[in-house]
Image (spheres, rainbow, N blue to C red):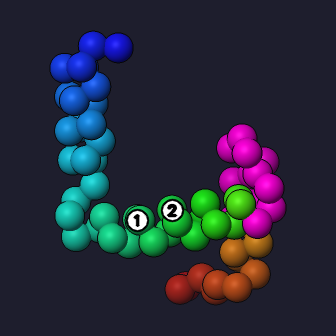
Amino acid sequence: MNRKIVEAANIAINNLLPTKSRSLYDIAYNRFKKWCAEKNVQLYSENVFLSYFSENAKNYKSSI
């Protein structure tokens, strides 16, 4: 792949999240990756996300 395209894509990816939110996003994403490793999930799908969020819903309550 063209090096300039890869560099432009990396810059765009790094600027998608505001700096203030990035650390919270990274924490949440790392939790998800750890959960996937524990469950031996190799491919992400809608069912994987539903299962992950369903499990987490048991531990967290709505703020309403």
In the picture provided, is 40 more to the left or to the right than 36?
right
Residue 34 seen from this side: yes
Q: Residue at x 70, y 59 (%)?
A: 36
Residue 22 in the image: state x and y as whole percent.
31, 64
Residue under label 2, please give it: 29
Which of 41 and 59 lies nearest the eye of the viewer?
41
Residue under label 1, please give it: 25
Secondary element at tag 2: helix
Residue 62 in the image: state x and y as whole percent.
60, 82
Mark 2 residue type: Tyr
As drawn, the label of residue 15 is none
Range shown magenta: 38-53
Mark 1 residue type: Tyr
Q: Quadrant of residue 5?
A: top left
Q: Quadrant of residue 25?
A: bottom left
Q: Residues within 10 Å of mark 1 (few under 14, many from 20)?
A: few
Which of 45 and 64 lies nearest the eye of the viewer?
45
Residue 59 in the image: state x and y as whole percent.
70, 85
In the picture provided, is 21 more to the left or to the right than 40?
left
Q: Quadrant of residue 9?
A: top left
Answer yes or no: do the residues labelled 2 and 1 have beta carbons within 8 Å?
yes
Q: Residue at x 76, y 66 (%)?
A: 38
Q: Residue at x 45, y 72 (%)?
A: 27
Asked if the stretch drawn in magenta spans residue 49, the answer is yes
Asked if the stretch drawn in magenta spans residue 61, the answer is no
Q: Quick one: quadrant of the C terminus?
A: bottom right
Residue 7 in the image: state x and y as whole percent.
22, 29
In the rendered image, the vertical position of residue 8 relative to residue 50, given as above or below = above
**Measured Cα–Cα span from mark 2 to mark 1:** 6 Å
